Amino acid sequence: MYLIEILQRCATLEGRIACVYRRLAEQAHGDSGTARLWRELALEQETHADILQRELRSFQDADDSGAFLPEYQERMDRLDRLLCTIESRANTLQGRDDAFATALAIEQSELEDIYDDVVLQSQPAFKLISERIEASLNVEVVRPPAAQARRRSKSTRKVR
């Protein structure tokens, strides 16, 4: 399996996971905090997919297939099977606990490890861009809860 194949499959898997998180957000419509969490996780996965697609295009533009990494074939196949199971489970969730168990299964999968490995196999400029995008995502995700906590503490003071 060449690096460009891994990039394509990972981008597809990241997109599918984003769809699962978006589905969880729709199902949590009555709980805005939980829905926001699912949307943020979906955005992170969509960003990963976009990063991977951009790197794939740069390899294709250079007519380069990247390194041959046969050990990834089985890992990718295993991830695909796991994601099929998770997607099925996401269609039949019975509440918040099931949703969090589904998210835990996603987050404990090998996809993040493979994503990191792919970034390491890629060109230096891609690594730098990926790190910057990841850092900006982490800052954006952290800010809203902190701002919300400040608002809660202000409203608590008014009640007293």
Image: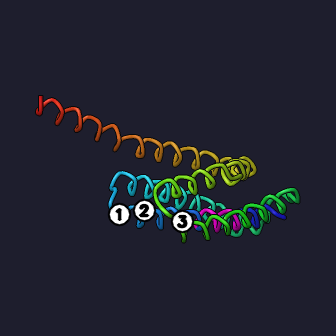
Res 79 → quadrant: bottom right
In the rendering, at what x and y percent does residue 25 appear?
Answer: 42, 62
Residue nearer the viewer, 139 or 42: 42
Label 1: few (<14), some or many (≥20) within 10 Å? few
Q: Secondary structure at mark 2?
A: helix
Q: Secondary structure at mark 1?
A: loop
Question: Magenta segment range?
Answer: 8-15
User: Which numbered tag is attached to residue 25?
Assistant: 2
User: Which numbered tag is attached to residue 20?
Assistant: 3
> According to the image, label 1 marks what residue?
29
In the rendering, at what x and y percent does residue 72 appear?
Answer: 82, 58
Instruction: Tell me what residue is drawn at x 50 percent, y 63 percent.
Output: 94
Label 2: few (<14), some or many (≥20) within 10 Å? many
Instruction: Tell me what residue is drawn at x 47 percent, y 43 percent.
Output: 138
Instruction: Tell me what residue is drawn at x 74 percent, y 66 percent.
Output: 81
Quarter holding the N terminus? Answer: bottom right
Residues at marks 1 and 2 touching, judged by CB atoms closer than 8 Å = yes
Residue nearer the viewer, 94 or 41: 94
Res 105 → quadrant: bottom right
Which of disc 3 and disc 1 is earlier in sequence?
3
Marks 1/2: CA–CA distance: 7 Å
Quarter holding the C terminus? Answer: top left
Residue 149 lies left or right of residue 37; in this view the side is left
Amino acid type, mark 3: Val
Which of disc 2 and disc 3 is earlier in sequence?
3
Amino acid type, mark 1: His
Amino acid type, mark 2: Ala
Q: Secondary structure at mark 3?
A: helix
